Amino acid sequence: MPLPRVTLGVDGIQTTPLGFGCASLFRISDSVERSAVLRTAYEYGLRHFDVAPMYGLGRAEHELGVFARSRRDELTIATKFGIRLTLAARGLSHAQGPLRRLLAARPALRDQARTHAAAPSGRLYEHGGFDATSARRSLERSLRALRTDYIDVFLLHDPLPGTVRSDEVLACLEHARAAGLIRSWGLAGDLEPTNEVARSFPGDVPVRQFRDDVFLRALQGRCRPVDGAFVTFGVLDQALPCIVRHCSENESRRLRWKRTVGSDCGDPDIVASFLLRAALRDNSPGVVLFGSTKPSRVRSAANLVSQAPEGPDLDAFLRMLDAELGQLPDPQSAERERS
């Protein structure tokens, strides 16, 4: 099913407005099921695939590379550098299938593991490496893992102000682009830190990838860089459980939203469709990343792209959201409950 195309910045990269994010792919413990999700994304027209060396404890790039090998010329692949796996994470990477099945069966143990992974000590990831030497090494590793001769978009992963040697990194990236190893580059992370890092580079950063949703609305009222492009991610992560909880916990409120919007906003699938439509409308010249472990949800998301995102129901949904914003539960706590 062909989808519309967008152009990412001055480098002329043609891709689809909906991209598949591989960050959650390895929540699926079975490789056949993971392949089915990737295949569904491809069959329903998605051509932009976003990955990073840390995803899947270092296995996601390899798995995407196997999938993409026979389709490489059709796909846009974005990967990143700057977050490294620790020795502990590399040791766990090949045993993660049985481990994830165990954690799925024991939610309390799973929550403890997530807390430990995010802790300042003993965590699975190391942040840093925003210098030319680290960038070159990471690029070489990603090219091997992805089984490709080039990366379409090579991104600094969650850079923090003051951590990036901008001049030498820029020289390295431009050299890689001239050599045909990358087609474009950019920054990926939360909006404010990446904006500050972007100001340390001369001229426009070709691609900005940042978190956005109906609460942040990072694109509203902003001037798009003259030659740059935006990729947004996380449009469902916190907003979806927050809104569903808000509508579900009070029956009169749920009915009021249904009368106004025309749909049951206590239904996660319906709310997800509104949030994706809003994201696609707000970032119509760019790419919205979407990830799921379920082929059915990938199909539903792809089908939204072929429809016009505008509509009175979407406007009504956003008006209700604005009117009751102060009554909604904390988005982060709602997301934690969902996970």
Image (cartoon, helix red, strand yellow):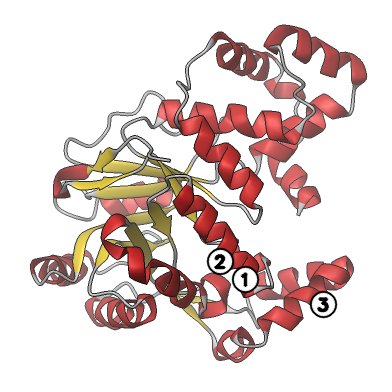
- Looking at this view, is 10 or 87 the one in front? 10
Which mark lies nearer to you, 3 or 2?
2
210 versus 154 height, above or below: above
| Residue labelled with disc 3 | 102
| Residue labelled with disc 2 | 35
Residue type marked 1: Val
Are the residues at dot 1 and dot 3 in contact (C-beta closer than 8 Å)? Answer: no
Q: Distance between the residues labelled 1 and 3?
A: 18 Å
Q: Where is residue 82 in the image (x, y as percent from the top left)?
A: 39, 71
Residue type marked 3: Leu
Label 2 CA crowd tier, 10 Å (few <14, some 14–19, many 20+): some
Q: Which residue is drawn at 58% across and 61% down?
A: 36
Q: Position of residue 251 (x, y in %)?
A: 91, 19
| Residue labelled with disc 1 | 32
Label 1 CA crowd tier, 10 Å (few <14, some 14–19, many 20+): few
Q: Position of residue 317 (x, y in %)?
A: 63, 17
97 vs 285, left or right, is right
Q: Where is residue 210 in the image (x, y as percent from the top left)?
A: 43, 47
Are the residues at dot 1 and dot 2 in contact (C-beta closer than 8 Å)? Answer: yes
56 versus 265 height, above or below: below
